[in-house]
Image (cartoon, grey):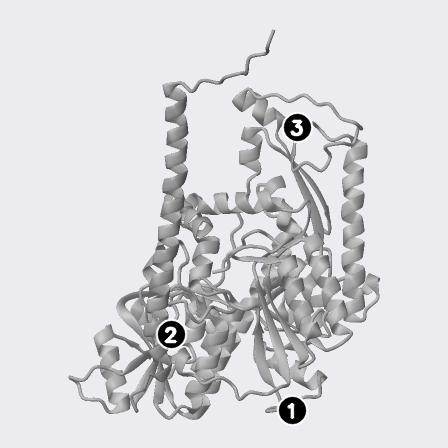
Amino acid sequence: MEQQPIVVKRTSFGRGILQFIKYMFATAAGIWLFLFLFLFAVALIGMAVGSGSSTTVLDEASILKLDLSRPIVEQAPDDEEIPGMSEYASLAGLEPKDGLVQILRSIKNAKTDDNIKGIYLQLAMQPCGWATHKEIRDALLDFKQSKKFIVAYSEIMSESEYYLASVADKIYLNPEGFMEFDGLHAEIMFFKGAFDKLGVKPQIFRVGQYKSAVEPFLKDKMSDENRYQVTEYLNSLYGTFLAEVAASRNINADSLRITSAEMLARKQEDLLKYRLVDALAYYDEVEADLRKRIGLEADKKLPFVSLNTYKKTVLPENYAETKIAIITTQGDIVSGKGGDGEIGSEAVVAELRKVRLDKNIKAVVLRVNSPGGSALASDVMWREIQLLKKEKPVVASMSDLAASGGYYMSMGCSKIVALPNTITGSIGIFGMLFQVDEAMRDKLGITYDHVSTGKMAGLNSALLTKSLSASEQQIIQDMINKGYETFTAKAAQGRNMTQDELKKYASGRVWTGLQAKEVGLVDELGGLDKAIAVAAELAKLKSGDYMLKYYPFQKPLLERLLDTGSETMLKKGMKEKLGVVYPLWSNYEKLSKMHPVQTRMLLDVPTH
């Protein structure tokens, strides 16, 4: 009998499903194509409009307006505010940021720019680290050598913003405003109680009694060791703050400490009494002062020039064939290319190789701003730094944070430069697994069963569905111990110490830059300019013989929108919806990405 072909009949329902899928994909593709073309067109228009900004002519009596209310990152793309694009960038979660590099460059240029008569500091609560504010503050102090004025105004300030304001010739506070002057405060969130209720059992492995990153999962309060180290570095931070504010305001440092400790400046009038501010005034009164300073009539508009505009008028350095490369890194350390707010080992290694092979680059400054992260990724970057250091000097410039994995990146450099209020050290290592079988069974009715080719299979799963045996626990602890020995051995090599001597300052303990200098974990105190000067000296380069070149290349706004728009939009939406609970979700997201072995300090320790 002849075999009949098999015929599959399409029912009307099947045809409908296929049609639906076809139209769904076509619609999605159309939307993405439209979005791409629309953003591309707006970008072209924006660049065309923005191209004229480089020819901006400043008024002969201009005032540089530094509105430092936006997040500050190490280096921001120059097209952060292309006309017509900023609104769409904001909707996509790519909020505009100011780059520290551009801020410092603008202040330095304004010092010798005859068209800039002074700086107006507009301050608001600003979430950035003490070292970042120190860099800006030092640049403002240098600007004052020109005898030009600095006027500061704010409606609300914490100590962090006041640290900047204190350099001003005159500090104004809104008559109904508020200034916090009561000392620094660190607060840590603990999850042990929640885990107990959920039935989640953290399996923690660490080396170092100060390695406190795991404490929130084990305890309901700080250990004695962690309380000691946090107290020590907070007092160091505040000591630097009080000393520098006292010098700028010509106030005795001891009396300033008492004013803070007793919270004597509680009312606006108290701020005047203790000479913390110069006047209580509304913004229009501040404007009147600024007009008077530049000889402008009352009915004339103040000739403010914003940072975004002014940075485009700053001429690039004179071209020189010889260069010093500055590689900026910021965020959590992860393997791979990394994303927004992350230091991807693969991406950083590519930049390090690029500058190593460039014969015109004679020295490198590695700018580090990181609480740490993956031990493996940190070591991968350390190795590439060693290869680079054999051919040209490499200087680490520590920013707000260069702790744990951030210190791992820095310790292999030829020299380490940190600011007095940098947070660094935390030389320690830990591993963390979460046993969830009880939680899943009791809360959700989900159970697990196992089949394995060996009794140790499944040991490296981030979520454990069975208890670890003593031998399994020992395997992981041995791995952590080995990681700690590797970390401290390489740190000792970089610092020219014996490993036993280095371990005195390790065990996960956190230090300020000032403290780290005293114990030999860093070489010099200073900011990015100091690190560049050290790099030039090591390379035997004289001022004017070289130019600076920054890495990595900053992607255009359109490309960033297409690369990270959906991810950053999700984060923005979660932050808006979750409110005060957002830090919990943020920490969970970080935990879910963690490599089993970590070199990092606490996930989030605010100091305000």
Mark 3 residue type: Thr
Q: Disc count in the image?
A: 3
> Taking 58 as reference, is 374 left or right?
right
Q: Foreground residue, 408 or 99?
A: 99
Q: Is mark 1 on a helix, strand or loop?
A: loop
Q: Earlier in the sequence, mark 3 or mark 2?
A: 2
Q: What residue type is labelled 1?
A: Lys
Q: Can residue 353 be seen in this view?
A: yes
Q: Find the distance from the CA under tag 3 to the CA under tag 2.
A: 53 Å
Residue 300 % position (x, y): 18, 84
Give the CA separation, mark 1 to mark 2. 31 Å
Q: Foreground residue, 124 or 387? A: 387
Quadrant for residue 191, please give it: top right
Foreground pick, 91 / 330: 91
Amino acid found under the numbered disc labelled 2: Asn
Residue assigned mark 2: 308
According to the picture, the residue beneath numbered tag 1 turns out to be 542
Q: Earlier in the sequence, mark 3 or mark 1?
A: 3
Residue that appears at 62% across and 26% down: 437
Which residue is disc 3 drawn over? Answer: 465
- The x and y percentages for residue 504 are 77, 61
Rendering quarter of residue 520: bottom right
Res 334 label: none
